[in-house]
Amino acid sequence: MLVMDALSLIRKPIEKELEQFQGLFASSLSVSNPLLKMALSHVLRRRGKMMRPILVLLAARCNGTVGEAVLHAAAALEMLHTASLLHDDVVDESDRRRGQQSVNALLDNKAAVLVGDYVLSAALQHAALTGSNRVVELVAWLGRTLADGELLQLSNTGSVEIDEASYFEVIRKKTASLFAVCAQAGAILAGASEEAVEQARSYGECVGICFQLRDDIFDYFETPELGKPTGNDMKEGKLTLPVIYAVNGSGAGSMRDLALKVRSGQVSEQEIAQLVDFTKQSGGIDYARRVMDEYRDRAIRMLRSCPYPEVSEALRRYVDFVIDRFA
């Protein structure tokens, strides 16, 4: 199925509300400051498929109606995500984001951080406009958790332990937490029961883990759409699930030594290529796909209580899209 065909089916139950969200989001980032306006226009041009706002709206529809508060929650969470990406590009010294020049490369690090701060402040304003203290607390928790995940990943660069538990702790904080809060906030603002709110949160977390696993698998193949070559994570000192499984499962001391060189930042491109090939040959990609499918199945189980078949089907398609996407 074509990407846009799949997305149109996912968006179908919330088409009107998604249009309202887009208008709210664009107007919220309409500014007069010339430098800020240029930077925000650049950011908005690269906005993707709005997967996170869509999740907020679908989670709300699964549990009731999409009111104005839900739109503000979707805006808050998309802006928090955008701000975190702006800051991440500075931390990672990245000059590309999804195939487009990053703001820190377009301007400089100072401007990128300040633009990120502006967008973060806008996110907090929208969180307040939901009128829900619980949602405000969730957004605040999420901001801390995203930063915690980044710092945890940085601290892992000095570790000699290569284990799945540490990997999953990082991706739960860095990626899955955002999807979890999107679904959770939508359910809360629709007036869902505590059981339904927890099911929404669990669904979102599973989807977020699938999202990160798919991204990690991409890194072992050429993906021009993502703006990163093969082995880019390793170039940044990151060890993801495929290579962790391959190294631990093979018992090859030379490959373990090579993986630790990746973490230290002292590895050559030739050595990265060698580790990428070893990971593929040792079943690392297949293992990551199996784990991703397990989390997909967990997410689907969380949809059994959704009383609206059209919305339940959209959420099922949502997790399948995350797994089957090409960028």
Image (spheres, rainbow, N blue to C red):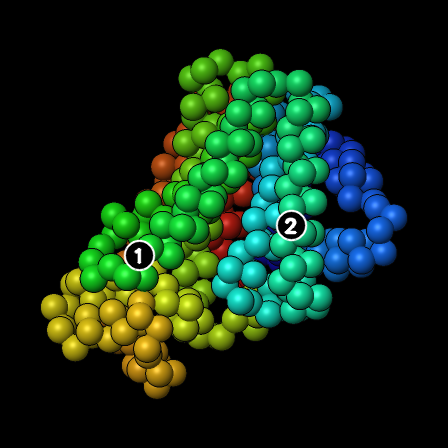
Does residue 12 sit above or below 111 in this rendering?
Answer: above
Question: Residue 277: x, y in percent?
Answer: 31, 78
Question: Residue 6: x, y in percent?
Answer: 61, 49
Q: Quadrant of the C terminus?
A: bottom right
Q: Single out the residue that lies furthest toward the bottom.
A: 270
Q: Is residue 139 visible?
A: yes
Q: Residues within 10 Å of mark 1 (few under 14, many from 20)?
A: some
**Residue at left 67%, top 62%?**
103
**Residue at left 52%, top 28%?**
138
Question: Residue 150: x, y in percent?
Answer: 43, 51
Q: Amino acid at mark 2?
A: Gly
Q: Secondary structure at mark 1?
A: helix
198 vs 315, nearest the viewer: 198
Q: Is residue 316 visible?
A: no
**Residue at left 64%, top 50%?**
116
Q: Residues within 10 Å of mark 2 (few under 14, many from 20)?
A: many
Q: What is the number of the mark on residue 139?
A: none
Question: Residue 174: x, y in percent?
Answer: 44, 47
Q: Amino acid at mark 1?
A: Asn
**Residue at left 12%, top 68%?**
251
Q: Which residue is mark 1?
A: 156
Q: Single out the residue that lies furthest toward the front.
A: 110
Q: Which residue is mark 2?
A: 116
